[in-house]
Amino acid sequence: MKENNFSKNLPKLRKALGLTQEKFAKYIGVKRCRLGAWEEGRSLPYTDLFFKIADFFSVNERELLYKELTEDDIKSIVKKIG
């Protein structure tokens, strides 16, 4: 089974775009504490929210979940988002 890297990738991407937990949580329609639980690895978002997050960052869902994104990956994603 592949390791879940979502809790590592989400804060890296969010911070690279200069978003606070509060702002990003508001965008996706959840409370900040829910987002915090995802970033701490205590839970995962429902499927619809997971797809919304992947879409927001213009990243493949499998990469968001399983790949441990490197600094170069993050820079490339941020550049793509513009």
Image: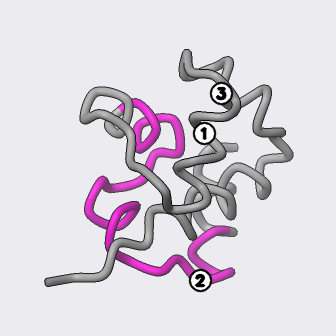
Q: Quadrant of residue 66?
A: bottom left
Q: Main secondary structure of the magenta part?
A: helix
User: Which residue is depicted at the point 60% across and 39% down?
Assistant: 35
Q: Give neighbour class at mark 3: few <14, some 14-19, many 20+ (Cα, 10 Å).
A: some
Q: Residue at x 69, y 69 (%)?
A: 75
| Residue 50 percent across, percent down from the top left | 35, 39
Q: CA distance from mark 3 to mark 1?
A: 6 Å
Q: Amino acid at mark 2?
A: Thr
Q: Residue furthest front?
A: 42
What SS does tag 2 mark?
Answer: loop
Please report contact status of discs 3 and 1: CB closer than 8 Å, yes or no: yes
Residue assigned mark 1: 35
Is 77 situated left or right of 16 in this image?
left
21 relative to 61 in the view: left or right = right
Q: Mark 3–mark 2 contact, CB under 8 Å?
A: no
Q: Over which residues does the magenta segment extend?
A: 52-74
Q: Quadrant of the C terminus?
A: top right
